[in-house]
C-alpha cells in the first residue's frame, strides 16, 4: 500500500475552477469531484460556474431532455 497518493500532474495551458476553494488553478490541483474543466484559458475557467449555469438553462429548454412521459397508444 502506498503511503502517498499520486496526484494528477498539471498541464500548462489547461485551466480548472475549484468549486470547493472557489479559485482558478492551472492544471488540476484539487480532486476531480471538486473542479470544473479543463478550460482553454484562465478567463474561461474563472467563468466556469456561470458557463455551467448557462448550459443547464439551455438543457432545461431543450425538448429532447424532458423528463415528462411520452403519451402511449392508450392516451386519450
Image (tube, rainbow, N blue to C red):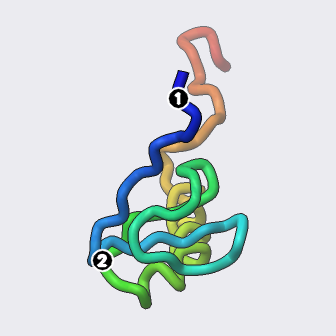
Q: Give the mark nearest the N terminus, 1 or 2.
A: 1
User: Which residue appears farthest toward the bottom when viewing the image?
Assistant: 43
Q: Which x, y percent locates residue 5?
A: 53, 40
Residue 27 vs residue 66: left or right? left
Q: Is residue 2 above or below residue 21?
A: above
Where residue 22 sits: x, y (%)? 68, 76
Residue placed at 60% from the left, 73% from the top?
49
Please name whichever residue, 65 or 2, is drawn nearer the observer in this view of the structure: 2
Residue 40 circle label: 2
Where residue 24 sits in the image (x, y, percent)?
A: 54, 80
Label at residue 41: none
Residue that lies at the very extreme toward the front in this rendered image: 3
Look at 59% across and 66% down and name the residue there: 57
Residue 12 versus residue 68 in the image, above or below:
below
> Would residue 45 be found to the left or right of residue 33 on screen?
left
The residue wearing badge 1 is 2
Q: Which residue lies at the image location 57% right of the left edge and 52% below the top edge? A: 31
For the residue labelled by badge 2, is the local secondary structure a helix, a strand or a loop?
A: loop
The secondary structure type at the circle numbered 1 is loop
Amino acid at each position: 500500500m502506498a503511503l502517498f497518493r499520486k496526484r494528477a500532474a498539471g498541464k500548462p495551458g489547461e485551466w480548472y475552477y475549484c468549486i470547493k476553494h472557489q479559485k482558478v488553478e492551472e492544471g488540476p490541483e484539487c480532486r476531480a469531484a471538486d473542479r470544473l474543466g479543463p478550460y482553454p484559458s484562465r478567463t474561461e475557467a474563472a467563468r466556469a460556474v456561470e458557463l455551467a449555469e448557462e448550459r443547464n438553462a439551455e438543457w432545461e429548454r431543450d425538448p429532447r431532455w424532458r423528463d415528462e412521459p411520452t403519451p402511449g397508444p392508450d392516451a386519450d
